[in-house]
Image (tube, helix red, strand yellow):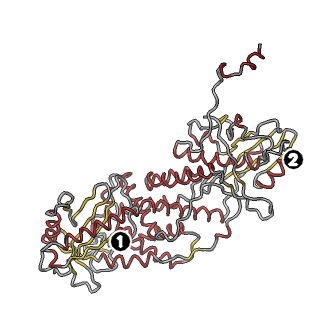
Amino acid sequence: MSYLNYVTPADSPAQQFARKQELFTLLDRIGQDMEIPPGRYKEAEEKYLAVSDVLHGCPTLSQYDPQVFAQGSFALGTTVRPLHGDEYDLDFICFLQKAHHLQHTQRQVYDYLYKRLANHGVYSSMVELKNRCVRVRYADKFHLDITPAVRNPYCYRGGLYVPDRKLVIWKASHPKGYVEWFTPIAALKPRLKMLEKAVEGRRVALGTTEKLPEQQMPRGILRRAVQFMKRHRDTYREQYPLHADYAPISIVITTLAAHAYQLAVGLGEYDSEFDVMNAVIDLMPRFIGIEQDWANKRIYTVLNPTTDGENFADKWSDPKYYEVFTAWHQAAKHDLRNLEMLRGRDEIQKSLRNSLGSLETDRVFGIQTQRINQAREQQTLHIPAAARPSIAAAAALPVPRNNFFGK
Amino acid sequence: MGFLRTKSLSLPHQLATLRANWPEGETRLTQLGLTWNGPLIPSMFSRTYVVRVSYQSPQHLPITQVLSPSLDELAGGRKIPHMYSQKKGELCLFTPEFHEWTGQMRLSHSILPWAELWLYYFEDWLATGEWQGGGTDHPTPRTISTYSAPFLRSLR
């Protein structure tokens, strides 16, 4: 029984590197699949321009010169399909350029917006009033959340005031500035070790993911990391219903991730994009501000870096929020890091299903298998030659036609 | 591949092509025939499967077994498709009736690529429960009416 003594050789550094690269390609693909599809993106753009026209045509609103623009994940490029259903959540600001926050109450600004849409023939059946926005629903495709805003005269960086209907206060915000802050950070390129040439050793044959073509709007590592965490948060909420209401909101994740990415890129050299993603998650909690107030109560802050006075973690005065953030963060960190340790394509698939949901995961894995099947049918499937320098004769092996026998 | 090549490949010839193309494994030729023992990794994320191909002579069909890990255990009691013997880990890589494998073919260019492909579909099956690799069913016994009349006559 000599085979029992057969020891599987440990992975060489080159193999570990190749695996990590492949993992990022996989996450990149899944991220692309979670995004709003290009066709629907276009549709959403058309719809929002149409809404914008309607608002301009309003006798009340037009006095204030409304300007409608995208904010949030739609503007940042970090959209994630909801876990259930197919209705993307797209956020817009309706900035009343000529309105002043002392001239109008929070209620009024809403009512202008809501009434205009509710009285309009096309939109009357689609409009809903939310706490901070007016929602226009396009069933099963997306909904546009339009938040009215006025200028914030105290912010020298061009920030806005957004009304909170329940609290009846103006909240500072700076959606455009935020996008302008996030975009250059996302464009930073980390230093990666040039190990590509070093990939050698045992052959690995089938089912490598095709890299995304660069011209297809390169999203970059930060956006993919944000998408991973947002979706991971969504599945986490389902797995821990008691935590669900306290899970971190997207803007908290996005802000912490962008800070962490900026730091991670400056810290040094990485083996692969996958390691950068891990570093981003690891470093995130550092950017949560923790202070103590006069009563020794902890105050958590995740500040909007582009305007004063907007704390994205304003709800965190309840310590439960911080606890759940920490628990979720541990889970996300573990689930990403652990992908590296798993052996077996099925194990990776199961793990990703668990942390990101099965729809996109199964689709991406299925496409891989379909590509192999196609190549088999066309008799173009090859197994790369063993990469051993001493063997010059070995060429890629074509796979002849076969039928697996039996049931 | 040559239809002109009518003679079966000798075991030493098989040995040579196996050693040249699958150097990560160990190829042995003994009185009992030819064996190749080695690791197969069907895809980047896959496990390392230790596989043995044994080939007694050109008159025999090659036998492919997965020695480790235990496929049976990985399947968790489910019946794995396309296996001769789940206990012994014997894979059904080709359909003998279609003459997909002949003694004129090189093991290195047929059996081993097929084994790797089989293992790829196996991992896919573990995750999805569906065998995406296609194949043929084991035949049911032929009914008597399907035999030719001269053949039946010869039995008398």
What amino acid type should be assigned to the residue bearing mark 1? Answer: Ala
Residue B100 picture quarter: top right
- Using a 10 Å C-alpha cutoff, classify the residue at mark 2 as few (fewer than 14 neighbours), some (14 to 19) or many (20 or more): few
Vertical comparison of A272 with A205: above or below: below
Vertical comparison of A73 with A241: above or below: below
Residue B11 picture quarter: top right
Pinpoint the chain carrying mark 2. B
For residue A232, side relative to residue B51 (left or right): left
Relative image position of residue A168 (x, y in whole percent): 15, 70
**Residue displayed at 53% across by 42% down:** B130
- For numbered disc 1, what is the local secondary structure? helix
Query: Which residue is labeled 2 in the image?
Result: B12
Vertical comparison of A358 with A120: above or below: above
Relative image position of residue B123 (x, y in whole percent): 58, 47
Query: Which residue is labeled 1 in the image?
Result: A75
**Residue displayed at 75% across by 59% down:** A395
Q: Residue furthest top?
A: B156
**Which part of the image, by quadrant, shows the C terminus of chain A?**
top right
For residue A106, side relative to residue A356 (left or right): left
Q: CA distance from mark 1 to mark 2?
A: 66 Å
Q: Nearer the viewer, residue A32 or B90?
A: A32
Relative image position of residue B132 (x, y in whole percent): 56, 44
